[in-house]
């Protein structure tokens, strides 16, 4: 057996044993249902696992991950996760979490051909276009990339609030907050971008979906 593949099973056995030592009934209880209060939309980067960086246990966060933590309105996978988490699981908080040093954001800043992934990165380039004056003013390439990471999270939070899924929940009186966070690979700490939205009235009128249309 491939040693890397084998190591996964060894790690799994140790993790399972450790969890059962902490709580002998953990897996029995966890297998019955899930009722996580949080949906986490994060980057696929292997260095930013949601449970580990938040110190939470399995069952406490519902997770969707893709390159550069994007919320794209034609992405049926993301929309399905969002719909299920809001309307079935009843989450109260939806988080978009980006991270400094994001490979997807760095790639979007490049003009090098990337193949199929270019279709995805174009959405990040659109974020750059919206904030081009500010970003072009930042001469340090690393700091420019970090700022684009932040702006990208803010735009994805905004994209979430534009979905009929989120607005329908608000129209029905559900308590639901959307947040934007940044994870710093160098410190292991999360930063709140103060982008929390809790009501459709915080959106421009032309983005609001009338309650009668849901």
Image (spheres, rainbow, N blue to C red):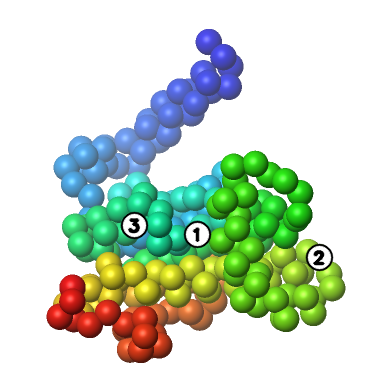
Q: Which residue is mark 3?
A: 79
* Residue position marked by numbered label 1 in the rendering: 70
In the rendered image, is residue 173 in sight? no
Between 110 and 156, the one lying in front of the other is 110
Which type of secondary structure does the marked residue at label 1 adopt? loop
Q: Neighbour class for label 1 at 10 Å: few (<14), some, many (≥20)?
A: many
Q: Residue at x 26, y 38 (%)?
A: 27
In the rendered image, residue 119, in percent from the top left (x then y), is placed at: 57, 51
Q: CA distance from mark 3 to mark 1?
A: 11 Å
Disc 3 residue crowd, few under 14, some 14–19, many 20+, Cα 10 Å: some
In terms of sequence position, does the residue under pointer 2 or pointer 1 come before the other?
Answer: 1
Residue carrying label 2: 141
Which callout, 3 or 2, points to the residue nearer the camera? 3
> Which quadrant of the structure image shows residue 88?
bottom left
Mark 2 crowdedness (10 Å alpha carbons): few <14, some 14-19, many ≥20? few
Q: Quadrant of the C terminus?
A: bottom left
Q: Residue extending furthest right?
A: 139
Residue that appears at 18% across and 81% down: 211
Residue 118 position in % (x across, y down): 62, 49
């Amino acid at each position: 057996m491939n040693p890397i593949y084998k190591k996964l099973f060894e790690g799994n056995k140790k993790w399972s044993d450790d969890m059962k030592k902490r709580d002998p009934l953990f897996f029995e209880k966890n297998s019955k249902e899930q009722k996580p209060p949080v949906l986490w939309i994060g980057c696929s980067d292997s260095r930013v696992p949601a449970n580990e960086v938040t110190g939470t246990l399995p069952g406490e966060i519902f997770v969707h991950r893709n390159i550069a933590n994007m919320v794209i309105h034609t992405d049926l996978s993301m929309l399905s996760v969002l719909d299920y988490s809001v309307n079935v699981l009843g989450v109260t908080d939806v988080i978009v979490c980006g991270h400094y040093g994001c490979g997807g954001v760095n790639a979007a800043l490049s003009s090098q051909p990337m193949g199929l992934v270019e279709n995805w990165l174009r959405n990040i380039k659109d974020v750059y276009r919206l904030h081009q004056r500010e970003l072009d003013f930042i001469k340090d390439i690393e700091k420019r990339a970090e700022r684009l990471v932040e702006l990208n999270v803010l735009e994805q939070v905004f994209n979430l609030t534009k979905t009929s899924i989120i607005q329908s929940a608000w129209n029905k009186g559900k308590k639901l907050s959307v947040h934007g966070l940044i994870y710093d690979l160098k410190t292991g700490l999360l930063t709140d971008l103060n982008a929390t939205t809790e009501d459709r009235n915080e959106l421009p009128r032309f983005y609001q979906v009338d309650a009668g249309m849901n």
